[in-house]
Each structure stands twice: as structure tokens, then as C-alpha cells.
Amino acid sequence: MNNKHITRAVLAVFAAAALLAAGYVAGTHRAKADEPASAAASGRKVLYWHDPMSPNQHFDKPGKSPFMDMQLEPVFADEGNASTGIRIDSTLQQNLGIRYATARRVNVATSFDAVGTTQFDESLADVVQSRVTGYIDRLYANAPMQRIKKGAPVASLFVPDWLAPQEEYLALKRSGMDDAMLAASRARMRALSIPEGVVSALDRTGEAQTHVTLTAPSNGVVSELNVRDGAMVAPGQTLAKIAGLNPLWLVVEVPEAMALQVKPGMSVDAVFAGDSTQHFTGHIREVLPGITTGSRTLQARLSIDNKDLKLTPGMLMRAHIGGATSASRLVVPSEAVITTGKRSVVIVKQSDGRLQPVAITTGIDTGGDTEVLSGLNDGEEVVASGQFLIDSEASLKSVLPRLAPAVQTYETTGKVDAVSAHDITFSHQPVAALGWGAMTMSFGKPSATAFADVKPGETVHFAFKQSDDGYELTKVDRMEAAK
């Protein structure tokens, strides 16, 4: 009797264990079968499966990740990719501080901002020259940049060559010579550059003069002083240069990018950098030829009024150059434009709320706005703040390309037909991004030792890019390894 009970108990235990094992196997099989079934039942198209911890590795079937102890996750066509953008939750947008702006058309003149410096107006400069050979007896202007008034003495010259003709004239006059001889003697003195005032004084006083004082021809400053006390001077030698302070030149440094837009006659509103209340206006008189190699700027020159003598040469001015005509331009806030060095990008908000980076061509800056020549349409919304945070969020999801310039790559699957030191030949599936159908062609290898484990007859998933020599492989993965 006891043996029968023991036998029944053992059989019951085995039966329970068998039922549990069968249930586990069935449940596991059903769970695995339900993964693609649930995706299919939802009506959503699966692009590929991937491990979220290694999002760049794509698989064509579900299964266990080769990298982590977890199941691969599907990526659906409507979840966003490089061509459709990403969707960010409204709460997250608020936390990121994302603001939007609308591309709009405005009438703006051909205007831009630049910097300039004040300079002496060289067209009004005067020089003090000697017409005779002599010596500096006294120098009144003793330092450059010294202010001087019109008629003020600059230098006194001792001219020894004037003594003989004056004594000769006095001798002829005392001897009672006729007027013809005296006139000839006076003409000789004028030919020796003896001033008429000295000749007249000679008649009145009867005393020869050997000194002459040179005076400033205009108000201004002594911009150049080329002699010192006691120095010998020759006929035609410049002793000093007098530069005026009213008006002054304003030389504007025009950026090279705006060089073709600046024209003579354009209005200029200049503001003194040290006092924004001081405005000076004028019109560009001439555009100087040549680009300054150091700053890559073109110089434009205009004359500005300085009757109050508030300005001196060398002052920094902020200038706004305005065009005579206006035109309708499509603009976005300048803060919305991300410049990478090789291209300009804005992030556009699509009609379904997704965010998509778009490359644009920019024109001139109009204050706080930037002109858009191509890439956007009037009325489109762009992200005005938080662009780089969006880029980081998108990169974690592997659905947006980085905003930095990147080489376009293409992916497909195919069978390896031949392998050489320089290329691999595939019979591959269509490449929709390039408009290719299924075909057989060769792709270059980055080096002779690259993809050494790839053998003819294998089915692979490969990626390639366009290079100067055609198309070059960047990745080759055997489908068996991926599985």
C-alpha cells in the first residue's frame, strides 16, 4: 500500500514539472513571436532593429542584442529619421527654452554696419616752403601736432644772398641813377625771391634786410615738421605741413563680403564710439581701390563736418552705410542661423510638429535679422533658441545628423561576387537615396587590408560614400554575424 502511494506521488511531481516546462517553452515562443506580430498589428512600418546602447548598428530582424543582454528594439518609419526630423515633447521644449520665429519678407535698404577712423583731410593740407637758400634763424613751431592759427609765424630765415642786391640798389639810388636802372635793380631783387614788402621797406628806411618770417597759410595743426633751429634750407624745401581740422575725413573699413555693394553717394551715419549721442552724417565720396590684406576690408572715404572741433584724427567711429533703394527680402532672426563654417543651417518646425535641420544660403545682415537667399519659404517657422540642445537630443536618438558638415553615406545589402586588393564587387539591392536599382558593381576599399575577412559568396550589409575616385566602402558586415 505504501509503495502505491509513493509511486503516485512521484508520478504527480513529474507531471507537474512537465506541464511547467511546456508552459514556459510555449510562453517564451509566443512572446518572441508576438514581438514582430505586435509591430505588424499596429500597422507601423519597421525600418530596422537596433540596440539603443549602440544605435548606429542596424539589424534586419528582431532578436537578442549582440552587445547587451537585452532584446533589439524596432525603429519605425514614423518615429523620425534624417529625412523627416524628430518630435520633441512640448514639456521638454518648454524645459529647453525653445522659441520659434517666422521667416518673413521685409523691405530693407542695401545697408550694413562697419567701423571707421577719422583722418586729416589731405585735400585741404597746406605746406610752408622756402624759396631761397638760407638758415633757420628761429623756429616758432617746435613740435609736430602743435595747433597753429592762420598768419602765425612758423620759422624765421636768415638769407645772406639778399644783402648784395639790396646794397646795390641803395648805391644806385644814392648816385642819382635814372628810373630805368632802379627798375632793373628792383626786378633783379624780385627774381631772387625778395618779397615785395622787403623792397618797399628798402625804399622807406634805406636799410637792407636779410631775414624773412614764414607764416601759416591756414588754421590747423602742424602735422609735419621737417627742420630744426640752425638748419640750412634750399629753395623748394618743405619746412612744415599744416593740416586742417574742419572738415575731417572718415575712412570706413568695409568688409570684403560687402565690397560689391558699396558705392559713392551712399549715405553714412557715424556715431562716435566714446559717446553714442554724437552723430555725424555724410555721403561716401570715393571708394579706394585695393583690399587691405591684413583685415580683408575695402576702404571708403567721406568728408564729415567738424566745425565744433569735437573730433580729432584717429578717433574710432561706428558707421551705418545705407543704400538709396530698398528691396523685399526674406529674413529670419540672426540668432536662428547656425553657421558651421562651410554652410548655414536653421531648424525648421514642420506642419506636424517635427523639427528638421535645413541648409540655407544667407545674404546680408540687417540689424538683428539675416537675409535668406534660398532654403526657406515665407511663413515657415524656425527655431530661434535652443538649437544646439535639439541637436544633442536628436543625436541621442540617432535620428538627426549632427549639424557639423558630414559626408553623406548610403547603405544596402548584397552578395559578394569578388574581392581584390583595391575593391569589392557586389550584386546589391536598390539604393533609393541615389535612385539606383538592383545591380552588380564594384566599390573601392579604403586600404588594401580593409575588410580582410569578407569572402566571395557571403551576403553582407555594407555602407559606402562618394569620393573623388568613385564610391568607397565605409562598412561591411556579414548578415550571418548580424543575426
Image (cartoon, rainbow, N blue to C red):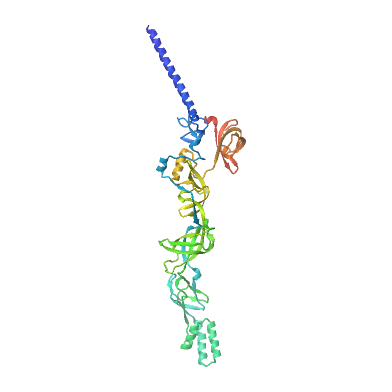
Query: Left or right of 66: which side holds 429?
Result: right
Towards the viewer: 436 or 474: 436
Towards the viewer: 464 or 249: 249
* Above or below, 476 relative to 331: above
The residue most toward the top is 1
**Is any atom of residue 211 visible in this view?**
yes
Tell me residue 377's x, y (percent).
51, 47
Q: Measuring 54% from the left and 61% from the top, which residue is drawn there?
A: 290
Tell me residue 483's x, y (percent).
52, 29
Q: Measuring 51% from the left and 91% from the top, which residue is drawn there?
A: 173
Towards the viewer: 130 or 369: 369
Q: Measuring 57% from the left and 42% from the top, which residue is drawn there?
A: 466
The residue most toward the left is 2
Tell me residue 228's x, y (percent).
46, 74
**Is any atom of residue 342 visible in this view?**
no
Tell me residue 54's x, y (percent).
47, 35
* Above or below, 176 relative to 13: below
Towards the viewer: 325 or 30: 325
Locate the N terminus by quadrant. top left
Q: How many marks?
A: 0
The residue most toward the bottom is 176
* Above or below, 143 relative to 163: above
Q: Measuring 47% from the left and 24% from the top, which residue is drawn there?
A: 30
Q: Quadrant of residue 150?
A: bottom left
